[in-house]
Image (tube, rainbow, N blue to C red):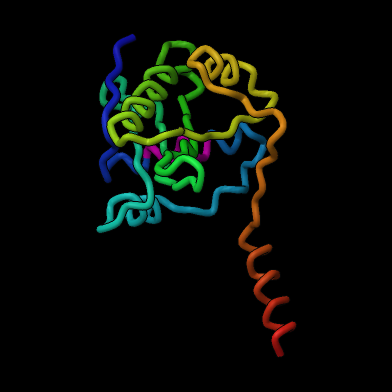
Amino acid sequence: MKFIIRKAKIEDMEEVFKLIKQLADFENEPNAVIISVEDLKKDGFGKHPAFFCFVAEVNTKVEGIALGFNRYSTWKGKILHLEDLIVNQSMRGLGIGTALLDEVIKYGHELGVKRINWEVLEWNKPAINLYKQKGANIMEDWRVVHLTNQGIKDYISKLLDENI
């Protein structure tokens, strides 16, 4: 199977969105995706892009993505966060995920980052094995913390009530 890895273009965002929805289904969160194709276009290709994205293309069709963004560590300095690495279910096992991860690692190296972070669900054993083979440290003792949009609103509301 021949594929190419390249930087995503704005025209790729419809296919990128389909893969994001596929990942949500895979992670048993089919209703969790609230962004749109237009959000991806606006956020990724404006004056100050909020994310970077690489795509894996097979016969001119996007079959995988690696999407991430810049972060800053108070201990390390510049780092990258890999938000999602997604390969179309019918294309898994062909080396596309490895090639996408390789591209992100090369990109981070070119930027001079001190670390690349990402999360993986504990039941996703194939991904965990891939990451370990690449030398990644799976930090079992850390917990991911999310404050949802509704949580942010509730928090602000509580702060406003306390300041009255």
Q: Nearer the viewer, residue 106 or 58?
A: 106
Q: Nearer the viewer, residue 42 or 22?
A: 42
Say which quarter of the image contains residue 155.
bottom right
Q: How many marks?
A: 0
- Residue drawn at x 29%, y 12% is 2
Judge left or right: residue 67 versus residue 8: right
Name the spot of residue 61 as percent of width and height, x first. 31, 27
Q: Is residue 47 above or below residue 115?
A: below
Q: Which residues are magenta?
A: 15-22
> 18 left or right of 56?
right
Image position, residue 23 (x, y; %)? 55, 34
In the image, is residue 17 part of the stretch drawn in magenta? yes
Q: Residue 146 in the image: state x and y as whole percent.
A: 65, 51
Does the magenta run of residues contain 52?
no
Q: Main secondary structure of the magenta part?
A: helix
Q: Residue at x 62, y 47 (%)?
A: 31
